[in-house]
Amino acid sequence: SLITSASGAVMITGQGGSGAGQFNRGVRVQDGGVISSTGTGLTAATVTVMGTGGASGTNGNHGISISGTNSLITSVDGDIGLIGQGGTGSTDQQIGIVLLSGGQVTSTGTGANAADITAGGTGGTGSQNNFGVDIEGSGGTTTHFAAAAGDVNITGTGGSGGNDNHGVNVILD
């Protein structure tokens, strides 16, 4: 699946549901899903993704989740902005922004207009591990924020409840 633009802005906003179980995510890009800006120069499309995890359920109420091989948010020259707010759940991992198992956010531009990446995540409320931004690789996959020439700015604020509520968590499982 693909959402793309060359010169018109891409804006995606999602609010997680209120299911009693797990994974009430605001925005989910998974299993090869792509959000992209292919434009170049000053008129290149920007990409903005805002997600808020659900306010009930158990675990995994992520604001923004990007996971699986070839799952990607990418741009050549239009800036990428991600804002994720973890939800509320009775157990763990109410994460603002999570990249897992091959999920990537990339800027491929190499010139003066190369896309910058800005990501801000805030953990929600749960029993533990309510990270602002969580980047986890596994099994030899490449999971990352990366820019060929643009800036990469990541800000995370840990959530509340229990322990291990890190602002930014980077780990290879």
Image: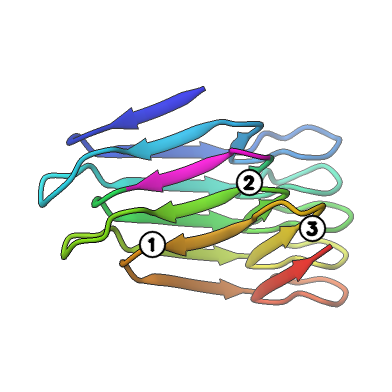
Tell me if mark 1 has few (under 14), some (14-19) or many (20+) residues whose alpha carbon lies within 10 angstroms of its own: many
Q: Kindly tell me whether residue 101 is visible in this rendering.
A: yes
Pointer 1 or 3: first along the chain: 3
Q: Which residues are magenta?
A: 69-75
- Check residue 151 for magenta coloring: no
Residue 97: x and y in percent read 60, 56
Give the residue drawn at x 59%, y 38%.
70
Residue 45: x and y in percent read 22, 42
**What residue sits right under mark 2 in the picture?**
65
User: Quadrant location of residue 9?
Assistant: top left
Amino acid type at circle 1 is: Ile
**What residue sits right under mark 1 in the picture?**
117
Pick the residue in front: 49 or 102: 102
Label 2, label 1: how far apart the Cα atoms are? 16 Å
Label 2's element?
strand
Label 2, label 3: how far apart the Cα atoms are? 12 Å
Pick the residue in front: 23 or 74: 74
Label 3's element?
loop
Please state if 4 lies on the left or on the right of 50 as rendered: left
Tag count in the figure? 3
Give the residue drawn at x 24%, y 52%.
77
Pick the residue in front: 59 or 106: 106
Residue 80: x and y in percent read 36, 54
Give the residue drawn at x 71%, y 77%.
166
